Image (tube, helix red, strand yellow):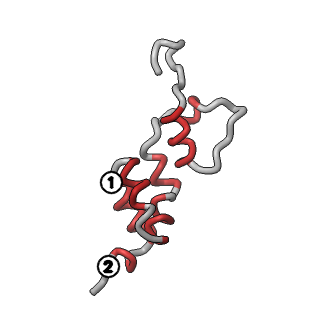
Amino acid sequence: MPNFEDLPNDCLALIISLTSPLDACRSSLVSKSFNSAAGSEPHWVKFLPADYQNLVPASQSFSSLKSLYLSLCDHSVLIEDGKMV
């Protein structure tokens, strides 16, 4: 009987992209295949705002979009001339 481990990485990544960021992080603990799929860049870009490049100071760099997402969750960013976070 086939299982999730038999699905291609792209298919797993698509499935995970339909979840929440928290569920994506949780799914990465299931297996190596899920970890790889949950860390895929196209998956994490869906959780970021469309203008996410404008929210990150040029002095900062991130190893992945997942780390950028987690950083934005942990650190408030002022936008709209300081009127919004």
Q: How far apart are marks 2 and 1 (CA)?
A: 19 Å
The quarter of the displayed image where residue 71 is located: top right
- The residue that disc 2 covers is 3
Identified at 34% across, 61% down, the residue is: 15
Identified at 68% across, 41% down, the residue is: 61
Label 2 vs 1, first from the N-terminus: 2
Q: Is residue 58 above or below residue 61?
A: above
Q: Is residue 2 above or below residue 38?
A: below
The residue lying furthest to the bottom in this view is 1
Identified at 47% across, 21% down, the residue is: 85
Q: Do the residues labelled 2 and 1 touch (CB within 8 Å)?
A: no
Foreground pick, 4 / 29: 29
Q: Is residue 22 above or below residue 79?
A: below
The residue lying furthest to the right in this view is 59
Identified at 64% across, 44% down, the residue is: 62
From the top left corner, tell me how far across and down residue 58 is, in percent: 69, 32
Asked if residue 13 lies left or right of residue 74, the reply is left
- The residue that disc 1 covers is 18
